[in-house]
Amino acid sequence: MHESLVHLVYRCLRRWCWRLGGCVLCLLALPLWGAGLGGADSLYQVRWPVSSQADSQREAAFTAGLETVLVRLTGDRGVAERPGVAQELASAHAYVEQFGYRQPAGLDGVLELEVRFSPRQVRGLMSRNRLPLWPARRPRLLVWLAVEDGYRRVLLRPGQQPEWFKPLATAASRRGLPLVFPVRAEDTRETVRVEDLWPLFPEAVTDLSEPYLADAVLAGRLVATTGGDWVGRWLLIDEAGARYFDLTAEQASGALGGAIDQVADLWAERYRLRGSTNPNAQLMVVEGVESAASFAALSGYLEALEWLGGAQLQVVLPTQLQFELVAAPDRQQMERLLGLDSQLVPVEPLVDGGASGDESMHYRWIGP
């Protein structure tokens, strides 16, 4: 570790820590549900259609909006049925931080209520009612879509057929998923043809998706049946591998929104926290912090983790920093959540000179 970093750590210890009996206890007081949400702010913002600015319309929109926020944050579409939540929804106005009305461009006569709910108060609601938390960092999902309407097969793109992608975007907003669309054919190494996508071969879809640098890929094909229904076949490729699922709906919009719900349900089950934390602190050893700037970046990163209750700097060695993570989820969940960012990369522990025992989590700081 460079001398400048040692000096920075020392100054931070002087500023942040208490000296107790010759030992240094450093508390980076990180709220359980996170602080400095940044991009996560959008999870607390809702636009809801209203027919007027009447009080009854506004209160109904507040209730529907808060339910949407809770669905995003918990990953549970049935969150309103959980004990205590209905009573909270009845007083949704108490959680509103600000609101205003808008008319969407190009839509005459349409009125929307924009609402921002207080993150602090909503997190308090979740804590009181023991609701699970799906952390704000979610995989960026690239979506490919092809359609057969009885006459031909077409590979769809947002710039050419935006009406097909609106249901996807609407459902993704409702569930809090960030989407990526293949906007132009020239974005890929070669022009993509519908024949390339239609079989939904995982290797081919992965190759087509590589230039977009998304965390996961959802590729689907929709077929209009003679009876008027839409049958969808979908391929999801994420960190767990490749899996297929099928959906049938009366409307194409239902098949598209249903696919997003399937993915969101799967990921919420995988990533959300269960409302309890590990009573025992978890040790983490971090390598690769070689400058004052990288130390500051690591500190900021840990502070922004909404699922982490605190990070106590325990040991400073020439090549490593050791932290004690408190109020944290279990180790398996932490590994999954850290893997979404790839800013801390797991490494094998050093054989000698290590800061702790075999039970520690060992990572290298890569940064943003």
Image (tube, grey):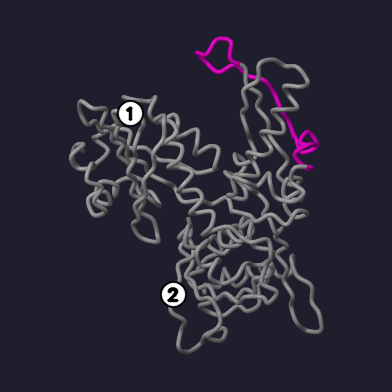
Q: Residue at x 62, y 55 (%)?
A: 304
Q: Is residue 12 left or right of residue 210?
A: right
Q: Which disc number belongs to residue 347?
A: 2
Q: Is residue 24 left or right of residue 190?
A: right
Give above or below for 155 relative to 113: below
* Location of residue 250 in the rendering, given as x and y in whole percent from the top left corner: 41, 31
Q: Residue at x 76, y 36 (%)?
A: 92
Q: Is there a contact, CB below 8 Å, between mark 1 and mark 2?
A: no
Few, some or many C-alpha atoms within 10 Å of disc 2 (few <14, some 14-19, many ≥20)?
few
* Location of residue 1 in the rendering, given as x and y in whole percent from the top left corner: 52, 74
Q: Residue at x 67, y 75 (%)?
A: 281
Residue situated in front as seen by the camera: 52 or 14: 52
Measured Cα–Cα span from mark 1 to mark 2:
55 Å
- In reply to whether residue 97 is colored magenta, the answer given is yes
In the image, what residue type sits under mark 2? Val
Few, some or many C-alpha atoms within 10 Å of disc 1 (few <14, some 14-19, many ≥20)?
few
Q: Which disc number belongs to residue 359?
A: none
Q: Residue at x 57, y 68 (%)?
A: 4
Q: Which residues are magenta?
A: 87-110
Q: Quadrant of residue 331?
A: bottom right
In the image, what residue type sits under mark 1? Gly
- In reply to whether residue 239 is colored magenta, the answer given is no
Q: Which residue is mark 1?
A: 227
First reached walking from the N terminus: tag 1 or tag 2: 1
Q: Secondary structure at mark 2?
A: loop
Q: Is residue 90 left or right of residue 275?
A: right
* Location of residue 117 in the rendering, given as x and y in whole percent from the top left corner: 71, 37
Q: Residue furthest top?
A: 108
Give above or below for 353 relative to 171: below
Q: Secondary structure at mark 1?
A: loop
* Location of residue 24 in the rendering, given as x and y in whole percent from the top left corner: 74, 77
